[in-house]
Image (cartoon, grey):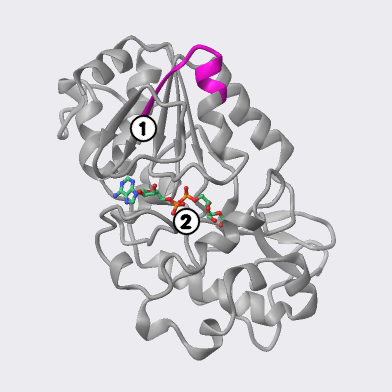
Amino acid sequence: MDEVRERIASARAIAVLTGAGISADSGVPTFRGGGQASGLAGDWPGRGGIADPKARLLGNSSQDDATAPHGPPQMNTPLWRTHRAEELATPEAFARDPRLVWEWYDWRRSLIAAVRPNAGHDALVDLERYEHQRGGRFTLITQNVDGLHAEAGSRHLLELHGNIWTMRCTVCHAVSMDRRVPLPLTPHLPVCAGCGGLLRPHIVWFGESLDPAIIQSAVDAAVSCDLFLVIGTSGVVQPAASLASMAREAGAWVVEVNPERSASAAVHCWLAGRAAEILPRLLPDAWQAGGKGASDV
Ligand code: OAD
């Protein structure tokens, strides 16, 4: 822990990769691993069942999101029990039955709307401020679509798999944000304010490519940082899983925060524990527990 804090204090560029584990302490279930996902995660049915098929399907051009294929028992209606995420989060499913896909996303949005960022998200906001105050660079790369990093206040954020609060026009491709819960889906599905085309979730679905500019920015951040933090990800889904290796090969020191060892072999240091407990302790003393000695970024 002390060495990591020293590395943070001396880093000129920090890059961070987060996965479902950082949102576990907010009550969003992870896909894999036995970490202490406080709140609802342990109670939700379907943990694990959805993960492996997705991992198989996800190559470097096929992604979806990190939050939703599980639901609390009372909301796991027969409709959703009979549809797996990889059956709904595809362009083919949307083309076949856009209403079904929208209803599923509306249900997922309502789950995420009920949770809040935790101390782990907050610590990364503080780390960004700290690094900027020192004139350093900070990039937060996340696989999560729950929007909790942005809600916490992270600024330089790369959402690899998209964001569940955004929509994209299937005709003119304009992207818009809509945080309404529930979404009005009747009598008509959401349409583009500009051209009237059908809107879809602005999420990277199975079989779709990541935004090349976003993944390139993530790679650039990984290979140009001197400290790379890997937080709450099992490290099995590409291309995110390769970022730690890229960072290490380029000379970065790589730290993992996770209750369990992940699949990443690139780690120099493993801090075993929950993100919400570990991350606040990585900041210099003056920045811990509300003693932030800095103005906003
Ligand atoms: P996973 O569910 O694969 O991994 C979650 C990781 O978080 C595991 O390694 C856990 O040990 C760890 N963990 C659990 N609780 C934690 C806590 N409180 N603090 C820190 N770590 C904790 O999630 P991802 O690696 O994000 O993709 O999954 C990557 C992608 O696989 C997701 O974006 C999603 C999924 O299929 C798509 O949906 C495309």
In front of the other: 162 or 38: 38
As shown in the figure, which amino acid type bears the numbered disc 1?
Answer: Glu
Would you say residue 94 is visible in this rendering? yes
> What residue is disc 2 on?
146
The location of residue 107, given as percent across then percent down, is 50, 76
Q: Quadrant of residue 270?
A: top left
The location of residue 240, given as percent across then percent down, is 57, 39
The location of residue 81, given as percent across then percent down, is 51, 83
Numbered circle sitting on residue 256 = 1
Q: Quick one: label 2 or label 1, which is nearer the N terminus?
A: 2
The location of residue 178, given as percent across then percent down, is 57, 63
Report if residue 154 lies within the magenta region: no
Q: Nearer the viewer, mark 2 or mark 1?
A: 1
Asked if 219 appears above or below 202 in the picture, the reply is: above
- What span is in magenta? 246-256
Residue pictured at 35% horizontal, 40% vertical? 261
Q: Quadrant of residue 293?
A: top left
Does the Cβ of the disc 1 residue fall within 8 Å of ligand 1?
A: no
Tell me if mark 1 has few (under 14), some (14-19) or many (20+) residues whose alpha carbon lies within 10 angstroms of its own.
many
As shown in the figure, which amino acid type bears the numbered disc 2?
Answer: Asp
Q: Quadrant location of the C terminus?
A: top left
Q: Quadrant location of the N terminus?
A: top left
Secondary structure at badge 2 equals: loop
Asked if 289 appears above or below 74 in the picture, the reply is: above
Numbered circle sitting on residue 111 = none
Residue pictured at 73% horizontal, 71% vertical? 191
Report if residue 250 lies within the magenta region: yes
